[in-house]
Amino acid sequence: MIYLTNTLSGKKEEFKPIKAGAVGMYSCGPTVYDFAHLGNLRAYVFTDILRRIFEYNGYDVNQVVNITDVGHLVTDGDEGEDKMTKALIREGKPLNIESMTEVATFYFAKFREDLASLNIEMPKTFPRATEHIPEIIELIKKLDQKGFVYKTSDGLYFNTSKFPAYGKLGNINLEGLKEGARVTANTEKKNPIDFAVWKFNPLLGWDTPWGKGFPGWHIECSAMSVKYLGQPFDVHTGGIDHIPVHHNNEIAQSESAEGVPLANYWIHNAHLNMNGGKMAKSAGNFLTLKSLEEKGISPLAYKFWLLGARYSTQINFVNVIIDSLQKGFGNFLSAIKRIYAETNNSEGTKISEGNINEKYKKEFTNFVNDDLDTPRALALTWNLLRDEGVSSSDKIATILDFDRVFGLDIKNSLKEDFILIPENIKRLAGERNTARIAKDWKKSDKLRAEIEKNGFSVIDTNEGYSLVPLGANPSPLKK
């Protein structure tokens, strides 16, 4: 059984799918007006682990991640300019849909590259808002016919007073939201927290019965999620910053239109802070995956670091962490590679000959199924590596099974660095170990130098020694 903390109830609940053996999962995707930063990417590492856990438990997952390429204003409260428009101005491009599509396509491609670098499974569908305008308009028509929207001089707005359950996700304090949501009040709104489903713009957008313009950010997710997953669907994910406004708005308009829940489980990841403050482009307080790679840090080292904390725990990324990222992941991979080298050389077996250790698998499954407890799952993996009662080949087979959830691409890392150790090197290492036991340090050092001259490093352990290729990169940046 899988247990998830559902923001809708505020409780940890047993996951029960709508359709046996299948999961419909919608994840709020990026607004593709700039490069994604590490804080943005934490959300997709989280959804990747969640999807992998479902698959690990035998579910067929239909994951949808939307791409916002119009309609997301610089604040969640429908104020300021469209973020895509901001990108066009920044890059000196004309203000039209064609240029907007060009910019969005560029940053969408970069986003996909980031996902690939993090070994994140690609969703089944990446719907773009601009390619779903007919569906969005039809949803607005339905809301209009039911009396949930009204027209102002700058757009069409959803009347939140007609949806009594507004704010139920996260049990939001509406009075606090009203006080903090607006800097400049829109006097045409019937309620301060009413939100735009369509914004008028005579120069940029699409023609509708209400006027030319573009959709609101919130209505896009409602229309696209339902098109690909139906209503209700199983799981909706996003960052905790989406709860007060964006996700409550989705719920209000979708449930008003169809009269049934939008999603049964709402799961949210916590923020990644940087030097004490929320990592954000608007504040200039962020790092990209590329900036880590330029420092010689593998994207998978960042993913490994994230797995050391629960998805629901706020974590702080400070400059000193950068220096330890690669070391931590490198130590993890090196420990696995030493066992892999022993397996293929001392035991004379191949990786496929190992068996998954059922005791460890059961414990691992219990951890990851308990609201994605990856910290305990990683600790268990270290215990497995140290367990002398489990053969090397079984350790490797079990760890590769665990990596179906971790997504650290361990199998390919092993293939890249593994080199069959020649018999003469094994012989020299055996002689050196005998000299070391006899405390003949001079001979031991001479034999070590001879081994290294031939391209290998000997690593002394409590159990004896291991041989690995000299200078092997424990976390290759390129594949």
Image: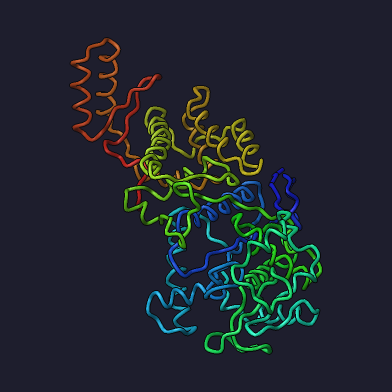
* Residue 198 picture location, percent across and down: 64, 79
* Residue 172 picture location, percent across and down: 71, 56
Image position of 276 with respect to 244: above or below:
above
Residue 8, quarter of picture = bottom right
* Residue 459 picture location, percent across and down: 32, 26
Question: What residue is drawn where x is 60% and y is 88%?
Answer: 212
Question: What residue is drawn where x is 74% and y is 46%?
Answer: 11
Across the whole image, how many numbered discs are drawn on residues? 0
Residue 420, quarter of picture = top left
* Residue 92 picture location, percent across and down: 37, 79
| Farthest-out residue, top | 438
Residue 219, quarter of picture = bottom right
| Quarter of the image with the N terminus in it | top right
Is residue 414 visible to the viewer in this orientation of the structure? no
Q: State the colouring used for the structure image.
A: rainbow
Question: What residue is drawn where x is 53% and y is 60%?
Answer: 122
Front residue of 412 and 215: 215
Front residue of 363 and 324: 324
Question: What residue is drawn where x is 48% and y is 45%?
Answer: 316
Is residue 225 visible to the viewer in this orientation of the structure? yes
